[in-house]
Image: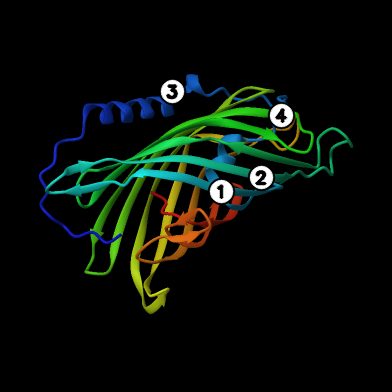
Amino acid sequence: MRLRPRRVHTREPRAWIRAGAFCLVWLAVNPGFSQARDPGDTSLVHWAYATTFGTGTYRIGDQDVLVFRAPFGWTWREAALSEDDGRRLGIKFLFPVTVGAQDFDLTETSPGEIPDRLEQWSFAPGAEIEIPINQRWALRAHGHIGWGSELDGGDESAWIYGAGISSRYTFALNDSVSLNLLNGLLWTGYSPSRGARDALSRLMTGVELDFPAGRWQFRQQQVYLKPHLVNYWYLDGVEFFFTEGELPSTLGSEWELGLAVGGESAFKLWRLKFDRMGLAYRVGDDTRGIRFVFSSVF
């Protein structure tokens, strides 16, 4: 979306927006909502991280994980900002389904102690509100709650919940090139059927570019290149357990570099709409991964 500056008379954001942002920050930094897991816990799946990664594959330590996330959703109302109607909030209902499979290194474990493959699914519906502050600045807040469980006879399950807020500020470098400054705060946790509950608090900051790819066109639309560079910082670190009784691997931060292509309008595939299509490489403390990009980091 290319934005041009325009004078618009709008009201200040309502007090509930500021209050909601304050509550989210408090949740993220309050340790009472996250309980450190003991290495003896039998819960080996970090449900919160799996549902935020997206679609792709990543490796943490010696563990490989394959994740597929179908971002089903329904946009009830698009966000808008005009001189006549003022500010209109955008509202979208989210119905994401995530399926994952992860392998464990069993070279030092006895047969039958831990399955050599865990397959999980989760469904965590929620809602998203987009708040246009002015022609350049927009906020987006969301919340979700759902359920996840193992497949193939596994008996582990978990409640999954979370909330987040993000910001995008756009600079129009010229008539066709824009630069987006991105920031966000995410808090998400889970309560497993076995073991202690856990959560992660993540700060995000990054940049996105949006510029035409020469004369390339797709279905009579101008093709745009959309690279991004983002840093994810986990406030308290994220602990991943690979085998029972062993010390966890802790994730403190990650960098992600991605490149996608998009058009002037969204791509459609069956009932899904994609703002863009591309790949991103993510690397962090003892982690690395590749994921598919179907939307802005914002």
Instruction: Residue at 42% x, 51% y: name it.
Output: 297
Q: Which residue is mark 2?
A: 100
Q: Amino acid at mark 1?
A: Ala
Few, some or many C-alpha atoms within 10 Å of disc 2 (few <14, some 14-19, many ≥20)?
many
User: Mark 1 or mark 3, which is nearer the start of the sequence?
Assistant: 3
Estimate the x, y position of residue 120 in percent, counting from the top left.
68, 39
Please give left or right for residue 222 compared with residue 34 in the image. Answer: left
Whole-Å distance between the Cαs marked 2 and 3? 29 Å
| Disc 2, SS | strand
> What's the residue type where badge 2 is placed?
Gly
Per the model, the C-alpha gap separating discs 1 and 2 is 12 Å
The residues tagged by marks 4 and 3 sit, at their Cα atoms, a distance apart of 27 Å
Image height check: is 278 above or below 23?
A: below
Mark 4, residue position: 156
Label 4 vs 2, first from the N-terminus: 2
Q: Which residue is mark 3?
A: 30
Three-letter amino acid code at the position of disc 4: Glu
